[in-house]
Amino acid sequence: MAKRKARVSDETFDEFLANQGILGACEERAIKELIAEQLTEAMKTQGITKTAMAERMKTSRRQLDRLLDPATPSVTLDTLQRAASAVGRTLRVELV
């Protein structure tokens, strides 16, 4: 039985995701994960509980949980700005 050599593709991972029609969704989820991770770390560093964070944001604990959950896709810029402000940070959005 002859062994077949695996072919290496010149396609990048981004191109693969784009060809599958999921590049945008993957990028959005990755960005959301990064923001959630940064907020969680800032809360931990400052000793801010989720309840206190929700109070600072003038929202519910449930809404904060949705913000920190990367699987929840819909988050407004206003919510992100309030979260950043609640941990003493600023939100920067840029087009590249």
Image (cartoon, rainbow, N blue to C red):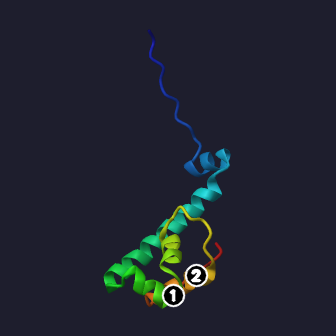
Direction from residue 47 to residue 6 in the image, left or right:
right
Q: Quadrant of the C terminus?
A: bottom right
Give the image location of residue 3, x and y in percent. Answer: 44, 16
Q: Earlier in the sequence, mark 2 or mark 1?
A: 1
Residue 48, compared with residue 22, is above or below; it is below
The answer to which image quadrant residue 43 occupies is: bottom left
Front position in the image: 14 or 57: 57
Give the residue number, with chain letter if any, for mark 2: 79
Give the image location of residue 29, x and y in percent. Answer: 55, 62
Q: Secondary structure at mark 1?
A: helix
Front position in the image: 8 or 45: 45
Residue 85 in view: no
Residue 22, compared with residue 7, is above or below; it is below
In the rendered structure, are the residues bearing label 2 and label 1 in contact, judged by CB atoms less than 8 Å apart? yes
Residue 57's disc number: 1
Residue occupying image coordinates x 62% and y 84%: 78
Residue occupying image coordinates x 56% and y 65%: 72
Front position in the image: 10 or 38: 38
Q: Amino acid at mark 1?
A: Met
Q: Amino acid at mark 2?
A: Thr
Residue 1, compared with residue 93, is above or below; it is above
